[in-house]
Amino acid sequence: MVKLIIVIVLVGIRSALAITRFFDRTVYDTETATEQLRNILRYGQKTAIAQHRNVFVVLGPNSAGLCFANENPCSVPNQVLAPSGQNSDSAATRAACNSRTWMCEGRPASITAGANPAITFFGFNSLGQPFNNPNAAAFGGLTFTLSGGGNTRTVSVAPETGYVF
């Protein structure tokens, strides 16, 4: 009987600790936003290689998207379509991207994001190599930091190869 009571108490303590995770989604939102950003960057690089053309990553204050032209905001004819035909269509994406078919994702309000160096766009050329300006010197690399709920994640783009990690 004592063992049963101890087990019940331990299960109660464990569930009390676990239940707080269900009420604070910020940690999960940070992980999701990090993976979405990685996927956008990788898809942009693959699209540039497959279509033998420049693909630009457009970084808005609350979004990241892909565009065939160096413009911010990206006009509809230049938007790179999402591979499944639709983005996540989350509330943040609807507010920031204004399109369900564009390869663009919004950043949840509970997450802070920044880029080092601070830029609003960069692109991938037809070889998949990243660049800041097609006529400028070599790309020096780029690191994005996403934070929320005590959780900090980074997404980096390597110079020369464009490897996203």
Image (spheres, helix red, strand yellow):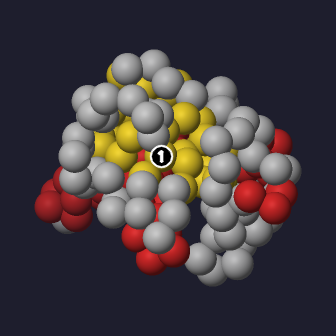
Name, please, the residue furthest toward the left: 3
User: For the point 23% across and 41% down, which residue is it?
Assistant: 159
Please state the horizontal and vertical placement of residue 9, each as a whole percent of the image.
Answer: 29, 49
- From this view, report whether residue 154 is shown above or below residue 98: above
Residue 131 image offset from top left, x and y in percent: 39, 40
Look at the image and tell me in which quarter the N terminus lies. bottom left
User: Camera-side residue: 90 or 118?
Assistant: 118
What residue is pinned by disc 1? Answer: 123
Q: In this view of the protein, can residue 33 be seen by the observer?
A: no
The spot of residue 33 in percent (x, y) is: 50, 47
Q: Residue at x 27, y 34 (%)?
A: 138
Q: Within 10 Å of the Cα at label 1, are there few (<14), some (14-19), or many (20+) other Cα atoms?
A: many
Q: Is residue 11 visible?
A: yes
Q: Is residue 111 left or right of residue 31?
A: right
Give the residue at x 82% y 50%. 75
Looking at the image, residue 118 lies above or below residue 82: above
Figure label count: 1
Vertical relation: 135 (above or below) 115 = below
Secondary-structure class at tag 1 = strand
| 137 lies left or right of 34 | left
Name the amino acid type tagged 1: Gly
Q: Position of residue 145 (x, y in %)?
A: 38, 30
Question: Residue most toward the bottom?
Answer: 84
